[in-house]
Amino acid sequence: MERIIAGKTAAQWQAEYPIITRLMRGEETLWPNPKRRPIEQARAACPLTMADIEDAAARLARFAPYFCEAFPETRATGGLLESPLVEIPRMKARLNAALPGRLMIKLDSRLPVSGSIKARGGIYEVLKTAEDIAAAHGMLPPGQDYTVFASEAMRALLSGYSVAVGSTGNLGLSIGIMSAKLGFSATVHMSADARQWKKDMLREKGVRVIEYASDYSAAVAQGRREAQGDPTCHFVDDENSQTLFLGYAVAALRLRDQLKAQGIAVDAEHPLCVYLPCGVGGGPGGVAFGLRQVFGDDVHCWFAEPTHACCMLLGMATGAHNRLCVQDFGIDNRTIADGLAVGRASGFVGRLMEPFIDGCYTLRDAHMSRLLFELFDAERIALEPSALAGMAGPAKLRALGALPAHMEQGTHIVWATGGGMVPPEEMRKYIDEGRRQLSEQQQ
Ligand SMILES: *Cc1c(COP(=O)(O)O)cnc(C)c1O
């Protein structure tokens, strides 16, 4: 008998959604989202609001004095974890000089503390957990300076609590480093894709690392199970956490200020296209959600995934979200983009994002690898493979006629989601591999 997947056979799913056959063949695919709605309608359908993002931003502002003390490298930004937004004209020339609009990159690889986009959501959730515990113990009277989080008394309090998370690597790094710094005991459940150096780095910081032979979804499920029934353990649930999502969304408020400071307009005549690498969905989802709240219909957000880990495209195109995983269709979830090696997307994020995003696309590992080399060669910016997924977006949209009107006066932002902690010898290997892939393609 044929296997039934969420109520249908694979053949029935394919007949109903022909795009699945393309995904199964490993072809690079672009899916424009027919459910995108004008901002007023999108807002009306959504339980989260701008007020929730502002609440998260205010919490991060309260912690800023603590960061200045605990992580002196954050003093330059007043204790906020933020990354540069820069134009990359030489890379634009390599991609296609005729590409309409300005090409920029958002360098989350340079976020302090953990060098990836996970420093937004992951750290935010640890801070909120610490704040809740401290408040419940009377350690945050009105007007309390948050440098108290660097005190021995606070560390002693938090050492009675633990934080756990399942991760392909970068979320584990962010949660592990932040938790350990505050005094929590921390456990990270790492999937098979996680790089060895990430595990080593965490263990050095006193974090308990549990390794799995299986993929991300299994690591998360096991972490969730272990944390259940322990009231002193907070499990950061990457698949379902609203807190994590809102931490990521704060990026939109910061980007608004950065664009303004650089004199870059975003309006109907100056559209903004943003390309976000997508794993389980929380990072790109939170950022895109925030951007639509800030820029309304003038921003166009695209999610980018490896052909072998196209879970969000699969979930959104079918509307089945987390009821389907890529392995259901024989897609193996094996990719050099370890940060995106997720077979089943977050159902919470996929459903929430339906009216907000413009679509999803996939790209091959070799393509990501070539872009990694080209960006390094052209701009001397070194990123991990996952962080290049967005770079394919502008040319793809142009080739398919999917760019918005007035794009010649608009701006593309490629969200460079990570790479800041990659050891130099690992980075060297990534760059060499990219060079090899490029020369192979040119032959
Ligand atoms: C985690 C991660 C992403 C994607 O974020 P999700 O919340 O998993 O969708 C993208 N790039 C890098 C480098 C990451 O570590």
Image (spheres, helix red, strand yellow):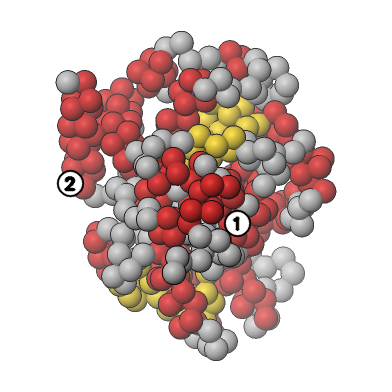
From the top left corner, tell me how far across and down residue 101 is, in percent. Answer: 54, 17
Q: Which of marks 2 and 1 is nearer the N terminus?
A: 1
The disc placed on residue 425 is 2
Q: Residue at x 66, y 17 (%)?
A: 405
Please state which amino acid type lies under the numbered disc 1. Ala
Q: Residue at x 23, y 41 (%)?
A: 430
Q: Residue at x 51, y 60 (%)?
A: 9
In this orientation, does residue 317 appear? yes
Q: Is residue 373 left or right of residue 94?
A: left
Q: What element carries label 1?
A: loop
From the top left corner, tell me how far across and down residue 409 is, in percent. Answer: 61, 14
Q: Which residue lies furthest to the front in this view?
A: 1
Above/below status of 119 relative to 407: below
Report which quarter residue 209 is drawn in: bottom left
Above/below status of 268 relative to 242: above
Local crowd size for mark 2, using a 10 Å CA cut-off: few (<14), some (14–19), many (≥20): few
Which residue is labeled 1 in the image?
Answer: 320
Q: Which of 337 and 127 is in front in this view?
A: 337
Above/below status of 400 relative to 327: above
